[in-house]
Image (cartoon, grey):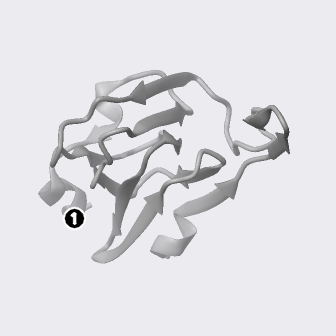
Amino acid sequence: MSELKDLYQLITLPKITDSRGNLSFIEENEHVPFDIKRVYYTYDIPSGAERGGHAHYEQHELLIALNGSLDVILDYRGEKQIISLNKPFNGLHIKPGIWHELTNFSCDCVLLALSSCKYDSADYISDYSQFIDR
């Protein structure tokens, strides 16, 4: 049986620093452990707003706070973990089957998400009681 710690991974992306600034990059199947099918980002999140609040049947996601910060609350079978994302070279890989809520966004947060699937509403478990009963 899986445990929460088996369903997510913190990934440190390459960071190149010189007098011109910093550069980080992502290569599919090198830094991201899945094929990237969709890329999206959130920004201008209102104070106190929350996002996420779902799990996926199939989809893997990699979340990166490109600017600012946020907290990701992970939940699996009653075990919870809060991960703070606040560096543009750190990513959080969330595997299928884990409930995740995004909260505590800084006013300047820009969150990049890389997904293993194109959008499909049937892949989302958005009802927490349904998630718990699985």
Identified at 76% across, 36% down, the residue is 21
> Which residue sits at x=53%, y=33%?
115
The quadrant of the picture occupied by the C terminus is bottom left
Give the residue at x 50% y 52%: 94
Where in the figure is residue 19, as x and y percent of width and height?
Answer: 85, 37
Q: Amino acid at mark 1?
A: Ile
Residue 41 location, quadrant: top left
Residue 2 visible here: no
Residue 17 drawn at (x, y percent): 83, 44
Q: Is residue 46 visible?
A: yes
Q: Position of residue 119 (x, y in %)?
A: 40, 22
Provide the residue designation for mark 1.
Answer: 132
> Nearest the camera: 106 or 41?
106
Left or right of 58, for residue 22: right
Q: Nearer the viewer, residue 36 or 27?
A: 27
Q: Is residue 71 above or below residue 68?
A: below
